[in-house]
Image: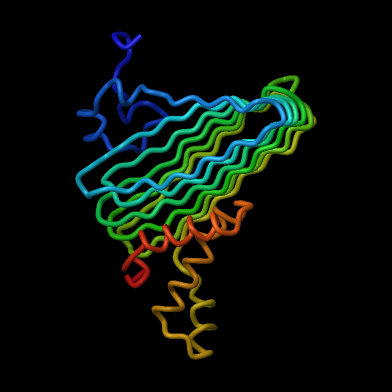
Amino acid sequence: MTELATLPTNRDEDWRYSDGAFLAKADLDAINHWRTLEVPAGETRREQLTQSGSANSGSTDRLRVHVGRDARFEGFYLLSGSQYQRMEVEVTLEEGAHFEFGGVTIGGGASIQEFVTRVIHAHPGATSNQVVRAVQSGMSTGNFLGRIEVARDAQKTDAAQNFRAILLEKGASANTKPELEIFADDVLCAHGAAIGQLDEQASYYMAARGIPPQIARKLLIQAFIGDAFENIVDDAQREEMLDKALHELGDLSGGSA
């Protein structure tokens, strides 16, 4: 009930890296609103969203999905431009279901973009794959908090999540908090994370072949971002998401690391 709900603060674990100033003045109903999606057994649903806005705005989007037996849900998201943006996805998987997630954050100034996911493997044989890429400049921050829960009877689970961040300037930052809660014993669960600058060796290799540094930088970032959208089956939709990301990136690719 709304009257029992409270605004989150940075003391709450799932909101620890969020924008405290935005949360303090946020609309209670908007913060606590969840969109819901039911994916029927054997069917596939896909969602592709780009969220961007002015430097003074902020937004949260919370999605709860139930994926039926042998069904599939794919979510691909781009967060950029706003002072604070949060995309939260909670997915429950039935037997043999699959969840595919690809997310990109692009930030400049003092903005914060974050993905928060909770994947519940409730039954046997379900799979999930999450890939998040962050490109941060200025004093911006990119976050990924990913939780995987495997129930006691959810044998043959195969779950993976991977987060990587490129910091284009010294003031930029990234945070990741992977969580695995596993009660079954016949599972494959993995997570990986890496935060750093652009590959200087690759930049040198491209420069040695006559590619101008600014173009080489853009190509490297394009390949980096492309990982998150690699599993979009439709070529046109994949290129559309990548083009939007590069558009939002703008002059960030030309900054100094």
Relative to residue 179, is residue 71 drawn left or right? right
Compared to residue 231, the image places residue 196 above or below, namely: below
Could you say where residue 14 lies in the image, as x and y percent from the top left? 42, 30
Given residues 51 and 123, the one toward you in this image is 51
Given residues 176 and 231, the one toward you in this image is 231
> Residue visible at 31% across and 53% down?
140
Residue 255, by quadrant, is bottom left
Relative to residue 244, is residue 193 drawn left or right? right
Q: Quadrant of the C terminus?
A: bottom left
Q: Quadrant of the N terminus?
A: top left
Could you say where residue 190 lies in the image, as x and y percent from the top left? 66, 42
What color scheme is it?
rainbow
Residue 178, by quadrant, is top right
Compared to residue 219, the image places residue 14 above or below, namely: above
Could you say where residue 183 lies in the image, as x and y percent from the top left? 70, 23
| Number of marks in the rendered image | 0
> Residue visible at 39% across and 78% down?
214
Compared to residue 235, the image places residue 32 above or below, namely: above
Relative to residue 213, is residue 179 drawn left or right? right
> Residue visible at 57% across and 25% down?
38
Could you say where residue 33 lies in the image, as x and y percent from the top left? 37, 23
Relative to residue 141, is residue 126 drawn left or right? right
Compared to residue 177, the image places residue 90 above or below, namely: above
